[in-house]
Image (tube, grey):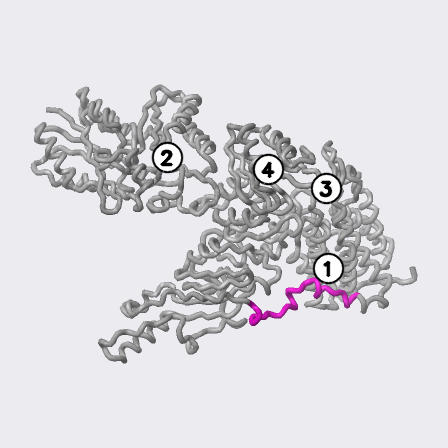
Amino acid sequence: MSLSKRSINGSDFTAMALLGAEYLERNVDRVNALNVFPVPDGDTGTNMNLTIVSGVRELRNKPSAHLGKAAEALSKGLLMGARGNSGVILSQLFRGFARSLANLEEAGTLQIAAAFQNGVDMAYKAVVKPVEGTILTVAKEAAKHAVQYARRTSDVVELMQEIHAKANEALQRTPDLLPVLKQVGVVDSGGQGLVFIYEGFVQHLTHSGTIQEKVFAFPSEAAAPEEVAAPQPAAVNRPSAVVRPTAPTSAQSKLATADIEFLYDMEFFINRKISGKSAAFFNEYAFKKALGKDGDSILVIADDDIIKVHVHSRRPGDVLNLAMAYGELTDFHILNMREQHRDLLEHEAAAEPFAPVPEYALTGDISSTELLAGPAAQVVAPEELHELAPFGIVAVALGEGIANIFLSNEVDIVLSGGQTMNPSTEDFVNAIESLPAEHIYLLPNNSNIILAAEQAAELSGRQVTVIPTKTIPQGLAAILAFKEEESAERNAAWMKSAAEQVVSGQVTQAVRNTSIDGVDIQEGDYMGIKEKTIVSSKPSLLEACQLLMAALVEDGGELLTVLTGEDAKESDIAALCEWIKEAYPDVELEVHDGGQPLYPYLFALE
Amino acid sequence: MGNIRIVTDSASDIPLALREELGIEMVPLKILFGEETYYDAVTINTEQFFEKVAVSPQMPTSSQPSPMEYQEVYERILQEDPGVSIISIHLSGAVSGTYQSAVIGSSMVDGDPDITVLDSKTASYAYGMRVVTAARMAREGASKEAILTEIGRMERETQLYFLVDTLEYLQRGGRIGRASALIGSILNIKPILSLDKEGMVYAVDKMRGTKKAMARIMDLLGDACGQDPVVVTIAWNTNKEAALEFLELIKGRFNVQEVEYATVGAVIGTHVGPGTMAVFMRRV
């Protein structure tokens, strides 16, 4: 190799990262295809890609020739965009990497190798139970080699080639470390993603200058339409019947101005469409309930994409923060009703004393007093408000029915997320920030989302407790164990132990032929999965459920909750319930419409 | 004289036969369906009450006896039995004005009668059993002090839990305090209620499904009573069968010396609705 480089600076690193991201993006499908499970959860590539897209976006926003600053920008973007286990680990790798380089304008081989090593240390620390044979092992082996190799060379290009080669070597050995990979005959998907990124790094360094322009044409904007889509309020079909709250009559004038407790009359629209990635599931009942905690005259009209909100509140900032979790806000009107009232009193005083007081509509002529809340409007941060709700709960769910169950049980915000679209760290952070609560609990309800939630808890700077629920049934059990009047520590302990007392089962269709956990699986079979183990695989859905049930009841249980998926047929549900009642007369059966995709049934036995 | 008479109110849920046998005076609370007024356990029983609830467009409410109604009862007893001591035991003052009315009623009686009005700080047969014990002791010639001591001991030894079938009535009554957080849940949630030391109703726990709720109540009773010998009262309003099943579970787990049966009356029914059962367990 004729090219060599004694050091890299921020510009070099930026170009490396952009090309790394591009390599990963090009290979997303390949990474996704490395499913170790024959269930449709092949989202590692997607998650890592979304994570790195967020990283390079930040890098573009804050370009710097200073290596430390560029690395920090990438790290920050990765942290905010982190999704899925591999995405979170990726973000931690570069977080450690960036910290190590923080004060360096540029770096040579020794410093770069040390930075890779620091990234690995950071990632191992972040993961509660590091599993070998994954992206962690790939990163670790590569960094370890880098540290040794850096003593022998001062050429960054050569070092990066070695890192890439070693990473690839470690990747090929992942099946030896993780039996499930060997069973299926694949290498680890997250590790593969990292190798692609490293490959991009190498490609930039070895083709430096020739491909740079192309690199900068990397179309990340296209992948993030929410950034370019312009609001189109005119095209939006607003609810035509805009209901006004009952207009206060002259009786209002008998009130003292100070009696108007909820003094800010607010009206605005939440545009769900513009916001593109509005991860928060909207439930009218829960939203109204949240508004009602500190407001009255609540009116919410939800259309498909537009939600009209009217409320009288003491804390307009809270209301806006809450609403922002659901989409972009438009057309604000905020009035101070005390001011209006004072005006009214003055007006009355000036008028004939016994004349009937004119009915005054709150939302009548507001042009003189209306306050347009543009970017400069003062939206008070939740922390600055005089009183916060004692707690708030954010849960992840897939399926409208399941979301509604959570929302009907004290959950404030439900982030939609399932096997194919995990909420990012940023989604969690946004949800946390929109809740004016002292202590916030996060229920990830999926083992692949726990890390993102934990990272968000750390980043948010608020009091946040992650209850590491791995399944929807665990999440439901945890939420019911919550006691408002108890301390966060005790609640966390209770919720965790409640989650552990549930046996989770799920049924889904296999997407390929394979053999796992000693069960032969044919494509199209229905597989019954108890916790993480496949216990049955049958062409008949009912039969798969029956075998699964037999496995679930092994440890006893009194209450079986069945959450039916969007694909479950009425007749199948009826047949299943009939069978369960007959086979397990001592088990109390509860069936709810969960509406989840991909899984005809989720079972929770407790 | 040393003669002692016992007075209570209808929310003590003492079966009529037992009340008559022991000569317990009962002042009824009122059950109102809109304008219609019924005297609890006098002009309406539990069964009739829930029949009426099912068809009435109005939700029932309950109201405390007036002080005068107590005054009349006290005065009648004093007339029948001059020089008698009266012990009057009542529904928790924290949830009802029944006790308050009794206190006022007793102060309205002329002369200087010996009337001891007690706030049971509990509900239903949890104090009904104290009333019954007091009446039995009085009949056997026990002193007022001995009776009051025994009532105090029973108060300390009694555990009580209500297993409520629906949140609907609790919500309307507005007397559930912290249990209100459950309202609106889509899940089949069974609240377990009890009364605290101050006599306030509180939600002990919330379980999904009756079986889990029963298991939870037994765990709670187990913590308090272990394998000590106990007297158990099982009570229900519309669901005798389920209550008796629950009793069997309890008998299988605890050292039960004696079983009593009671009906959760209309007053409590107004607040908890149909399908409610209750367990009162007392160490002997």
Are the residues tagged 1 and 4 within 8 Å (C-beta)?
A: no
Which residues fall within the magenta stretch? A215-236
Check disc 3 and report its element: helix, strand or loop: loop
Find numbered disc 4 in the image and state the secondary structure of the residue it sits on. strand
Instruction: Point out the frontmost of discs 1 and 4.
Output: 4
Q: Label 4, on which residue? A: A504
The local secondary structure at tag 2 comes to loop
Identify which amino acid the numbered label 3 is placed on. Pro
Residue mark closest to the camera, 4 vs 2: 2
Task: Kindly identify which residue carries mark 1.
Answer: A101
Residue A346 x, y percent position in the rendering: 30, 77
Q: Residues within 10 Å of mark 2 (few under 14, many from 20)?
A: many
Q: Given the image, on which type of amino acid does mark 2 rest?
A: Thr
Q: Is residue A52 above or below residue B244?
A: below
- Inspect the image, locate mark 4, and give the three-letter code of the amino acid beneath it: Ser
Comes first in the chain, label 3 or label 1:
3
Q: CA distance from mark 4 to mark 3?
A: 19 Å
Compare marks 1 and 4 and give the one earlier in the sequence.
Answer: 1
Residue B75 appears in the figure:
yes
Please tell me whether residue A229 belongs to the stretch shown in magenta: yes
Select label 1 or label 2 by which is in front: 2
In the rendered image, residues at marks 3 and 2 fall on the same chain: no
Q: Is residue B245 left or right of residue A591?
A: left
Nearer to us of marks 4 and 3 is: 3
Q: Residues within 10 Å of mark 1 (few under 14, many from 20)?
A: many
Residue named by callout 2: B276
Magenta segment includes B36: no
User: Which residue is labeled 3 in the image?
Assistant: A38
